[in-house]
Amino acid sequence: MLDKLTSAMDFHTKALVLRSERQRVIAGNIANADTPGYAARESNFADALRNASGSTGTSVGTTPMVGASGTGTPHARHIALGSGTGGIGGSGNEQGYAAQTQPRLDGNSVDLDRERAAFADNAVRYEATLRFLNGQGKTMLAAITGQ
Amino acid sequence: MFSVFGISGSAISAQSQRLNVVASNLANADAVAGPDGQPYKARQVVFQTAPMGADGGAGVRVDAVTESQTPGRKVHEPANPMADAQGYVTHSNVNAVEEMVNMISASRAYQNNVEVMNTAKNMLLKVLQLGT
């Protein structure tokens, strides 16, 4: 019974976990900006979220908000990116390598500008997800107290 | 999320070691010969990716500190007590311009990583405020 109260929050909870994982990947890229031979890593957020919310079999897919945001199948003509195996360790989620924009002689493929932009973007989206969670919690609380 | 501090912390310590090496290179830029009779050789740090935690984080560590093998600067100073038979004094092989560039790069990378840690800290603080 209680899981029905919190199942609405499930989607955002998973999104929050994935956002923090992406933040970690970007932090690793920024930390290795000067390491020779390092290949920048990139995680596909949409795919990871689809995997996370699909595998548990919750009712996330049927909520109107998710349906509208287009987490369905990709367009038939889109070419799927061949994601690598993540190199070191395995976080469970598919991790690929970022495409190189400006090749460097030392073999490092980190684009610092892009990483910083992605980091800031991810931080803002993380906070947005937190606000959604907060709002849902407040809504539920208002319904319970009946005021 | 807590491993972000480990990742950025490793980068900060690696960059500060790089800055240390730059400082010793610049300090010895005009050194003529050490106690062993050899002129100072410029040092360079070599970075390497270090796995951080079980979930695939990528930190940095200093793999090695190498000595540059380029020949030292030779200056004709017959009056110098360290001059050789031809009157040449061998200075260190430090390239001051290269070291300055290295210093700026290390300082910027350090700032970047501090900013990453600050952002991660703010994000975690926001999580703590959830539901209030």
Image: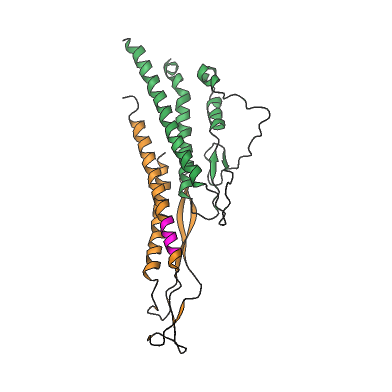
Q: Is residue A143 above or below residue B80?
A: above
Q: Position of residue B28 (x, y in %)?
A: 38, 71
Q: Is residue B100 above or below residue B70?
A: above
> What secondary structure predominates along the stretch shown in magenta?
helix
- Observer-nearest residue: A143 or A36? A36
Question: x, y (%) of residue A34?
Answer: 48, 54
Compare residues B111 and A96 and report the one nearer the observer. B111
Residue B59 appears in view = yes
Please tell me whether residue A117 is drawn above or below residue A134 in the rendered image. Answer: below
Residue A41 percent location from the top left of the image: 54, 44
- Residue B60 appears left or right of A39: left
Q: Residue B75's image quarter?
A: bottom left
Looking at the image, which residue sits at the far right?
A: A77
Task: List x then y, in percent, for residue A143.
Answer: 36, 12
Residue at 40% x, 28% y: name it.
Answer: A130
Q: Quarter holding the N terminus of chain B?
A: top left
Instruction: Check residue B11 for magenta coloring.
Output: no
B3 or B33, which is in the foreground? Answer: B33
Rendered green, the chain in question is: A
What shade has chain B been given? orange
Point 35% across, 32% down: residue: B126
Can see residue B57? no
Quadrant in which the C terminus of chain B is drawn:
top left
Which residue is outermost to the bottom?
B85
- The stretch of residues the image draws in magenta is B98-105
Question: Tell me, what colour scheme is on the image?
Answer: by chain
> How many numbered discs?
0
Front-lying residue, A12 or A36: A36
